[in-house]
Amino acid sequence: MAAIILDGKQLAQSVLTDLLPRVRTLRARGIAPKLTVMRIGDDPASRSYIRAKIRACEQTGVMGDELVLPASTSQAEILARLDRLNADPLVHGVLVQLPLPRAVDPHAVAARIAPTKDVDGLHACNLGQLVQGNALLQPCTPAGVLRLLDAYRIDVSGKHAVVVGRSEIVGKPMALLLIRRDATVSVCNSKTPDLGVFTRSADVLVVAAGRAGLVRADMVKVGAVVVDVGVNRLTSGKLVGDVDAAAAHTASHLTPVPGGVGPMTVAMLIENTVNAAERAAPGGLQSTA
């Protein structure tokens, strides 16, 4: 039997629709939620991702602004620009689009964004508070994965969850969020010997390694829930995930690529921006979230 497809595109639209009344409430109080995305350089993929984020902003009434800096911009200038965005009361969310030029330290950049405006959830403050379960803003992709699992009534409590990938953007926070849902979590990486031993034992398998076809169908437990976070472009131009498409005949549930986790990441970004705007409102509106 073919796997049930976890439709992130459809759910993302529902999330954005649910944000509309919250944005209207903010605007009625004279607050226009605003997201500023900083892009350094002219990476084509980054331009495409930012366009998707701006479109999602437009759907919900959130102001989406792209700040473009040349690839030659020094780290000092990037940090100075972030300082100005942090100090701007009209900007509620700040995101620096990755990848960055090699000369720029991504940790220094993430650390410079005010935690209250860190809509990517990558500031050390937010990642640290994620351990305690009270991050101001959660990393978008892991939060989107959980929202997708919830929408399909997939309970991870008591299940063995395997996360392939240990990045600060996906792997590590994903593991923390799954632990808080009472899953038993294993985290694998590129140096894990015999990866299949782990993936075949997973009730819930989240793959975020950035390697096309890394997980074959025979590496997936029959009936497992498979969340493919990877987005890889083949020489043919086709987008594929980290999990072989044939896993659809082994898994019980599977996210498509594209159309699975990607749209949910964008939706969570816009939701984080609205959350940040509500928190910054005089008197606070966070109780409406």
Image (spheres, rainbow, N blue to C red):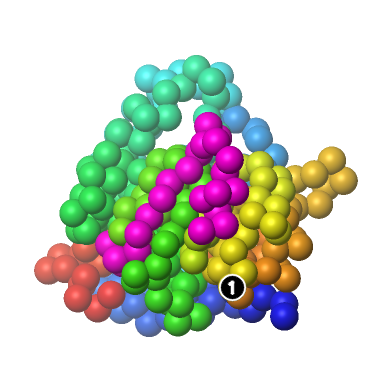
Q: Is residue 8 left or right of residue 126?
A: right
In this rendering, is residue 105 above or below 117?
above
Q: Is residue 75 left or right of residue 83?
A: right
**Residue where numbered disc 1 is placed:** 223
Residue found 53% across the figure and 72% down from its top: 12
Q: Residue furthest left?
A: 283
Q: Is residue 268 visible?
A: no
Q: Secondary structure at mark 1?
A: loop
Q: Position of residue 287 (x, y in %)?
A: 19, 76
In this rendering, is residue 52 above or below 80?
below
Q: Of residues 278 and 251, which is closer to you in this image?
A: 251
- Report how many numbered discs are placed on residues in the image: 1
Q: Position of residue 10 (x, y in %)?
A: 60, 77
For the N terminus, the image quarter is bottom right
Residue found 66% across the figure and 42% down from its top: 211
Highlighted range, magenta: 180-201
The image quadrant that residue 222 belongs to is: bottom right
Q: Of residues 43 and 21, which is closer to you in this image?
A: 43
Quick one: label 1, few (<14), some, or many (20+) residues within 10 Å? some
The image quadrant that residue 75 belongs to is: top left
Q: Is residue 134 left or right of residue 90?
A: left
The image quadrant that residue 225 belongs to is: bottom right
Q: Position of residue 64 (x, y in %)?
A: 49, 56
Q: Is residue 13 left or right of residue 179?
A: right
- Is residue 200 covered in magenta? yes
What type is the residue that disc 1 sits on?
A: Gly
Q: Is residue 180 visible?
A: yes
- Is residue 272 covered in magenta? no
Residue found 57% across the figure and 44% down from its top: 195
For the C terminus, the image quarter is bottom left
Q: Position of residue 89 (x, y in %)?
A: 26, 51
